[in-house]
Image (tube, rainbow, N blue to C red):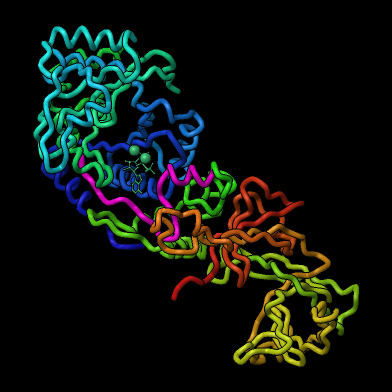
Amino acid sequence: PDAPRQDFIRQIVRSDLAEGRHAAIRTRFPPEPNGYLHIGHAKAICLSFGIAREFGGLCNLRLDDTNPAKELPEYVRAIQEDVRWLGFEWAELRHASDYFEVFYLAAEKLVRAGHAYVDDLSAEEVRAYRGTLTEPGRNSPYRDRSPEENLDLLRRMRAGEFEDGSRTLRAKIDMASGNINLRDPALYRIKKVPHQNTGDAWPIYPMYDYAHALSDAIEGITHSLCTLEFEDHRPLYDWVVERVDLASSPELLEPLRAAGLPVQAGRPRQIEFSRLALNYSITSKRKLMALVQEGLVDGWDDPRMPTLQGLRRRGFPPGAIRLFAERVGISKQNSVTDFSLLEQAAREVLDAEAPRRLAVVDPLKLVIANLSDDHAEMLTFANHPKNEAFGTREVPFSNALWIERDDFMREPVKGFHRLVPGGEVRLRGVGIVRCEEVVTDGDAVVELRCTLDADTRPGMPGADRKIKGTIHWVSARHAVEAEVRLYDRLFSVPDPDADGDYHQHLNPEAKRVVRGYVEPSAAGLEAEAHVQFERLGFFIADRRDHSPRRPVFNRIVTLRDTWAK
Ligand code: ATP
Ligand code: MG
Ligand code: MG
């Protein structure tokens, strides 16, 4: 395994623990349930859950459901399934909406203390008053309302008396701040939209920065790890945590205690790291959703998709994704990660874990003329070349085989060491055959008639006779027909979004479906079983469509990187 992890966040955690700043650490992973998780989220999951595990702490899964218009229970379920599939278990499952009452009481506290006010400016006016990077903003004419008036208006907002968008609750910070996030940001908006968790209970919803900071404080999160785009929000995060100061107002947490939810209340620290960006891919829920909605892929779990559901269906083992995340590492530098790093992690994990089988995906008939038509025998094959624990299996062999069409060349190019007219090749586990006759139909080669040199069979004196090529095969009489889905990268260029139109760069070769043949013991594998089809790559029995009578295999990766320049 790789060296112990030493990124800057783990160093902070280690020294916080060494200096006794926390008895135990607590982290969280806070996805918004507005789509499916993708490989970028896997980096964040491996970090927050991984750190909790390594340092004997706990990690919560928190669904950040503060924007009801785009959230669905379907996504809530899938997120939980994906986190578990990746190999992590949460200490507690929470919803930001569990805290709506606390957020509201905290807002009243801010209003009473003069730290927040109800503003009647429209969204457009708020924008106009906000100023720009070079110009300070202007105070809203409603900024100096008395705490009493603000409290009355806030309560009426909560009671549903006002129209959507007619008022907001804003933090009173500094309209001249160099950080635009501190120019009196909105804390609440009016939005009469039903919520997937709270139904029609709330006509107002908290804004992300406010809800996120308070959720972390309520759960006693010690290290709140998020991506770099939140760096400029950190002063607001700290402002919310400090002004609300849960420790000095235990009554704010009463609704949670009454509901039986354990609360740990503390002072969280936000730490930012760089997002994962993967070439030949896209890591944005919104853009992935567009591919699904436009029918350019077959759903969220299309094996070409970089969603966790897609990667799972494609066959990437969860351990490979964790290994990938570990190798990508954690830093504050934005960079683009090469897709081959993910493929290489899959090869390494699968090489150790996947049993070997024989399959042919582009079949050409090979008949062994010096064996009788009813010849049939069982050959014993090792299931793994490097690990005897995988055991052996019996593979049926007969006089009629399927081999790969590209293992034969009628007019061989220089350096081609497989089968040619009049030439010899070793059939894996069988012995050396010579191609005596090429049967054609017009230009097409339809069958090769060969003779097997009996002296080269295993155990015979000539078994070790030197020959350059070895090819794989399956017995035509015994093999099971299979649908084989040959997948590749979703996009054909490294930066599909460079010109703003990633639709133009979908890789037409990303999915090819062929009819092939697999040895009987491969057909019998269970759905989601991994396998290496020798010389072809690593495959998985499709999670949804595979059955022993109608086998369906997805190619995860080829055995070698075919994209390297
Ligand atoms: P998207 O832009 O794809 O919608 P998001 O950041 O809006 O992503 P959230 O559901 O809010 O999605 O993400 C949950 C957590 O996952 C956040 O803490 C976020 O920082 C992290 N995350 C999202 N995308 C990435 C990424 N590409 N790399 C690392 N972490 C990510
Ligand atoms: Mg988000
Ligand atoms: Mg987003």
- Foreground pick, 470 / 387: 470
Q: Is residue 347 above or below residue 193?
A: below
Left or right: where 503 falls relative to 522: left
Ligand 2: give its quadrant.
Answer: top left
Given residues 173 and 23, the one toward you in this image is 173
Rendered location of residue 440, percent (x, y): 84, 81
Answer with left or right where residue 458 lies relative to residue 384: right
User: From the viewer's perspective, is residue 155 above or below residue 397?
Assistant: above
Residue segment shown in magenta: 270-292
Q: Which residue: 42% across, 33% down?
A: 33
- In the image shown, does 225 or 88 lie closer to the viewer? 225
Q: Is residue 158 left or right of residue 137?
A: right
Q: How many marks?
A: 0
Image quadrant for the C terminus? bottom left
Give the residue drawn at x 42%, y 63%: 494
Residue 165 placement (x, y as % from top left):
32, 20
Query: Residue at coordinates 60% horizontally, 53% vertically from top-left?
Result: 529
- Which quadrant would residue 128 be assigned to in this image? top left
Q: Is residue 137 magenta?
A: no
Is residue 460 something one can see in this rendering? no
Q: Quadrant of residue 170?
A: top left
| Above or below, comparing residue 224 to residue 50 in the picture | above
320 lies left or right of 124 = right
Query: Dividing the image into 4 quarters, which one contains the N terminus?
Result: bottom left
Q: Nearer the viewer, residue 565 or 547?
A: 565
Q: Residue 213: x percent and y percent?
A: 23, 30
Query: From what the image shows, is residue 255 above or below residue 12?
Result: above
Residue reaching furthest right?
A: 373
Residue name at image x 57 percent, y 49 percent: 297
Residue 156 visible, this angle: yes
Residue 279 lies in the magenta-colored region:
yes
Q: Position of residue 30 (x, y in %)?
A: 34, 36
